[in-house]
Image (cartoon, rainbow, N blue to C red):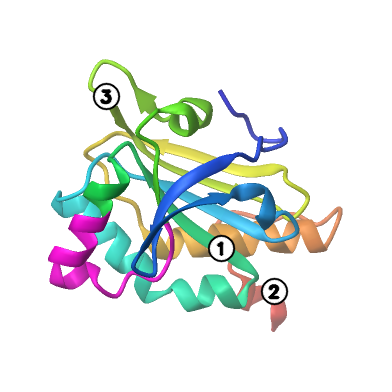
Amino acid sequence: MLKVGQKFPYCKVKVYHNGEIKEINLDDLKGKWLVLVSHPAAFTSVCQDELVELSKIYEEFKNLGAEVMSVSTDSVYTLKAWKESTESMKNIQFPMISDSTHTLTSMLGTYEESVGLTRRGTVIINPEGTVMHLCINDFLIGRNTKEILRTLKACKFVFDNPGKFCPPNWEMELVTK
């Protein structure tokens, strides 16, 4: 299981992205921030709501030099059907990773073998490939997507300013004033 401070073991994954099913090598993202957001299952309301909310602020992640990817144990064909048949999902711009082999979600520590699903996990990896943030929620607890963005900003601030820290309730806007 992956831990904060460890190097992320980049690997190849199957994704549904921009109307295509393809294999991508996460190794190609070295040098960028990577935000992985795992969710239990397609065609479920909380998962759908989280991805829709993430897509609303996706450009903010991109402007910070980060790529966002969702991860589930659904097949890539299920992810394709979900995105193409659900009106609110049609605007999702980030790649949707299929981890039907449970390799990635097991490595992230989010896979729950007894039910065959991944818990809601958030992983933030810095451009050097080190895990800076790892959070795992129960299946039933949805995430605050703006908090994921705030956490990325905090990780970037610490990464860009060695020796500095982020106190409780830290917000980048408060530091830049």
Q: CA distance from mark 1 to mark 2?
A: 24 Å
Q: CA distance from mark 2 to mark 3?
A: 43 Å
| Image disc number at residue 116 | 3
Q: Within the image, what quadrant is residue 137 found in?
A: top left
Whether the residues at callouts 3 and 1 have beta carbons within 8 Å, the answer is no
Disc 1 marks a residue whose amino acid type is Glu
Residue 103 in the image, given as x and y percentages of width and height: 47, 28
At a point 23% along the width and 42% down the height, the residue shown is 41
**Element at label 2:** helix
| Image disc number at residue 175 | 2
Question: Image height check: is 75 above or below 108?
Answer: below
| Sequence-first tag of 2 and 3 | 3
In the rendered image, the quadrant that contains the N terminus is: top right
Question: Image height check: is 64 above or below 8?
Answer: below
Residue 54 in the image, given as x and y percentages of width and height: 37, 65
**Element at label 3:** loop
The reply, left or right, for residue 107 in relation to residue 76 is: right
| Sequence-first tag of 1 and 2 | 1
Disc 2 marks a residue whose amino acid type is Val
At a point 25% along the width and 49% down the height, the residue shown is 77
Give the magenta-colored segment's residue range.
80-95
In the rendered image, the quadrant that contains the C terminus is: bottom right
| Sequence-first tag of 3 and 1 | 1
Task: Spot the residue most to the top.
Answer: 114
Q: Residues within 10 Å of mark 3 (few under 14, many from 20)?
A: few
The reply, left or right, for residue 76 in relation to residue 130 is: left
Residue 3 in the image, given as x and y percentages of width and height: 62, 29
Which is nearer the eye, 153 or 46?
46
Question: Image height check: is 114 above or below 42?
Answer: above
